Image (cartoon, helix red, strand yellow):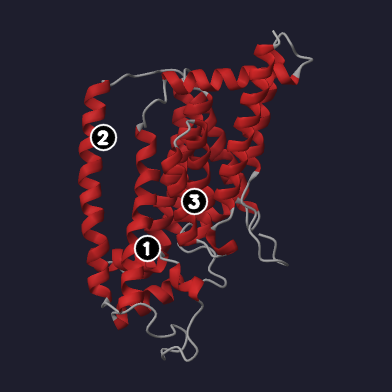
Amino acid sequence: MNKSTGAYVPVDLLYIWLLLVDNCCLWYTNPHRGSFTKCGSEFKQRTCAGMKIRLKDYTGADLLPLFIVVCIGLAEMAHLAGVLSGLPFHVCAWLFAVPVLLVLVLGACLGIYAGLARGRKTDKKGKWYLVVFLLLVGAQIAFLCAYPGGYRQGDMTVEVVGSFLETDGIYRVNPMTGLAYETGIPTRLKILCLPTLYAALCRVLHMAPQVLVWRVIPILTLLGCYSAFLTVGKCIFPEDAGKRRFFLLMTAALLWAGTYLYGMDGFQLLFSGWRGVSIRNLVLLPWLISLCLRKKKLPVLLCIAAEACITWTLYGLGVCLLVAAGLMITDLLLTHRSGKEEKHG
């Protein structure tokens, strides 16, 4: 984060590394090393072929990011119901919890059915990469459990969640003073639904706000992050499980390395995983990139809408919208250039 402007840096070194490594490897192995146009065309053809063969339908790696997006949408509906109609918070909590339970049951049934239909295939490629990756993830989970709520400067999530639970209402009192808001709160702030989501989970699960916000949610964000990056790995390496596992290993290593600086993705993951910008940067963005590569338009719109519900910057319509637009424009340009090359021989 740039502390002078308060703006978050949404793209970490991981995305730069991803593009450079894959395209440089492709350029080196391409007989037309002098032509970046031909290399780019081959990369696009290889990616599209992988999408048709492997990624025609959604995979198991999509389930957790999709579940997170659906939870944000359901929480936003319950939140707006409480803000606009003044419903008691315990009613809003169950308006959120019941659909989430139905989604969980439906998702479990679909996941089991899809797993039985596809059969279980064990790929031993890169198994040591997988072992080291799991060790790194286990260390990150242990860190989150040992040092909850690592960076809380300027954050009032727990206090706001506690005020919802104590007053049985949404934004009834100022959590800093315990008194009613004298001048009201900004309309944009009223739209953000993460405090309602966390408070509803606390109400239904009978869990303290500190435990849920500082321990449980960051672990869920971590798991959603790696699920989202796995979908990216499947787009880039559709036929090679070993390369996908190495990609996840490098992702975990870079996130560990990114903990040294405030605002880096690794720092957000391990020290403030409950914040909206952390969920956007670590779950929504990588999943959105994979969705754009697979041309899944409806989930892309859901990611853009989810960002608007959880982040303050640019009224929510910021990074996801820009990244999706950039990827779509790039795809159109590459398609147009490939068509010209094929037409002229």
Please name the residue shown 26% across and 35% down the image: 111
Counting residues from the N terminus, which is met first, the one under dot 2 or under dot 3?
A: 2
**Label 3: element kind:** helix
Counting residues from the N terminus, which is met first, the one under dot 2 or under dot 1?
A: 1
- What is the three-letter code of the residue carrying label 1? Glu
Quadrant assignment, res 323: top right
Residue 134 visible somewhere in the drawing: yes
- What is the three-letter code of the residue carrying label 3? Ile
Please name the residue shown 22% across and 72% down the image: 91
Is 188 left, or right, of 91 in this rendering? right
Q: Position of residue 32 (x, y in %)?
A: 74, 11
Above or below, 315 against 251 in this view is below
In-front residue for pair 284/300: 300
Q: Label 2, on which residue?
A: 111
Residue at the right extreme, as displayed: 34
Callout 1 crowding tier (Cα within 10 Å): few <14, some 14–19, many ≥20: many
**Label 2: element kind:** helix
User: Viewer-nearest of labels 2 and 3?
Assistant: 3
Q: Label 3, on which residue?
A: 304
Q: Label 1, on which residue?
A: 76
**Label 1: element kind:** helix
Label 2 – label 1 distance at C-alpha:
26 Å
- What is the three-letter code of the residue carrying label 2? Gly
Q: Position of residue 12 (x, y in %)?
A: 63, 46
Callout 3 crowding tier (Cα within 10 Å): few <14, some 14–19, many ≥20: many
Is 139 left, or right, of 96 in this rendering? right
Above or below, 285 against 9 in this view is above
Kindly check if marks 3 and 1 are in contact, taking CB atoms under 8 A apart as contact.
no
Please name the residue shown 42% across and 72% down the image: 158
Please name the residue shown 60% across and 31% down the image: 331
Is 109 left, or right, of 211 in this rendering? left
Above or below, 44 against 32 in this view is below
